[in-house]
Image (cartoon, rainbow, N blue to C red):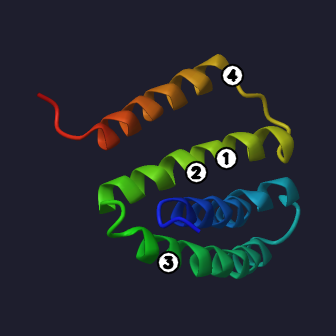
Amino acid sequence: MSERVLPVLLLFVSNIFMTFAWYGHLKHANRPLVIAILASWAIAFFEYCLAVPANRIGYGVYSAAELKTIQEVVTLTVFAVFSVFYLGESLTVNHVVGFAFIALGAFFIFKGPLG
């Protein structure tokens, strides 16, 4: 698999785990907090098993700033889908505009030097 594609795919899957680790317990607020913490740590372990290799493989193909930018864009994409389909929240115009500004920032990170 391409050195450019594999890190992005690994970051995408790792973010699915991390989103459930950080926000999945919100749907189960009646459970004790300590259970939520332990479950989140257990889920986050798998996120790290994917994110660390993604960054190790990706660094050299991408700069650290580019890897972080990919991570943030993937995080917002995964979270938007998660919040709508798992938590049942609405995606508003404000969210879309905010995400668009972040995407614009990502464009400038990858664009290279201006001027």
Q: Are marks 1 and 3 in contact (CB under 8 Å)?
A: no
Inter-mark Cα distance, 4 to 2:
17 Å
Q: Write down the residue under mark 4.
A: 92
Quadrant where the C terminus is found in the figure: top left
Residue 45: image x %, image y %?
64, 81
Q: N-terminal of the two: label 1 or label 3?
A: 3
Give 45 or 50, whichever is nearer the viewer. Answer: 50
Instruction: Identify the mark at residue 79; answer none if there is no mark.
Output: 1
Q: Secondary structure at mark 1?
A: helix
Give 16 or 23, whichever is nearer the viewer. Answer: 16
Q: Residue at x 69, y 40 (%)?
A: 80
Q: N-terminal of the two: label 4 or label 1?
A: 1
Q: N-terminal of the two: label 2 or label 3?
A: 3
Q: Amino acid at mark 1?
A: Phe
Give 100 or 37, whichever is nearer the viewer. Answer: 100
Quadrant where the N terminus is found in the figure: bottom right
Q: Residue at x 78, y 28 (%)?
A: 90
Q: Write down the residue under mark 3.
A: 52
